[in-house]
Amino acid sequence: MNYWLIKSEPSAYSWEQLKKDKKTDWTGVRNYAARNNLRDMKKGDLAFFYHSNEGQNIVGIAKVLKEHFQDPTTKEIAWLAVDFGPHKELKNPVSLETLKKDPFFKAMDLVRLSRLSVGKVTEAEFSKICEMGGIKPD
């Protein structure tokens, strides 16, 4: 299994909305590195759901329900989408500020590449953030 982080501004699409919808197409990614990460996701992979700009917290874990497909919001074949569903909510949101203060996370995509909307997460980072968030990793 691989681990990821997906970002969304809560006013555009929030964790609460994903829980309500139970499934969503992750569309609109227009960065090649982020697109490549979407392409590499496999069904069952887990992704932290990060509220960007407003809050700047990891608030939950989404699960890949369907691997990459043509992004329906564009006719350009270069862009992909992935289906996600809610998996687990963190009991304690984990802030970007907290991660930046901890040397353990200095190489994490979220810390190093703050503008990347879909990033990789190592298994060790995933486990530690789950622990910080008050949940057990699955």
Image (cartoon, rainbow, N blue to C red):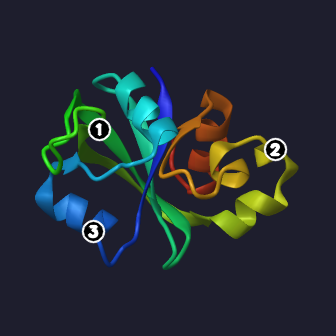
The residue nearer to you, when weighing 38 against 88, is 38
Marks 2/3 in contact by CB < 8 Å: the verdict is: no
Residue shown at 18% from the left, 47% from the top: 74
- Give me the disc on residue 102: none
Residue 137 visible in the snapshot: no
Q: Give the side of residue 59 with respect to residue 66, left or right.
A: right
* Residue 91 at x, y percent in the picture: 48, 62
Q: Quadrant of residue 107?
A: top right
Badge 2 is on which residue? 104
Residue type marked 3: Glu
Residue type marked 1: Trp
Alpha-carbon span between mark 2 and mark 1: 33 Å
Which label's residue is closer to the chain start, 1 or 3? 3
Reply above or below: 15 against 22. below
Residue shown at 56% from the left, 57% from the top: 133
Label 2: state its secondary structure. Answer: helix
Q: Give the side of residue 70 with respect to residue 5, left or right.
A: left
The residue nearer to you, when weighing 33 against 109, is 33
The residue nearer to you, when weighing 105 against 31, is 31
Label 3: state its secondary structure. Answer: helix
Badge 1 is on which residue? 79
Alpha-carbon span between mark 1 and mark 3: 26 Å
Picture quarter with the C terminus? top left
* Residue 39 at x, y percent in the picture: 36, 26
Residue 67 visible in the snapshot: yes
Instruction: Mark 1 vs mark 3: give the one in front.
Output: 1
Label 1: state its secondary structure. Answer: loop
Reply above or below: 45 against 31. above
Residue shown at 72% from the left, 69% from the top: 97
Badge 3 is on which residue? 16
Picture quarter with the N terminus? top left
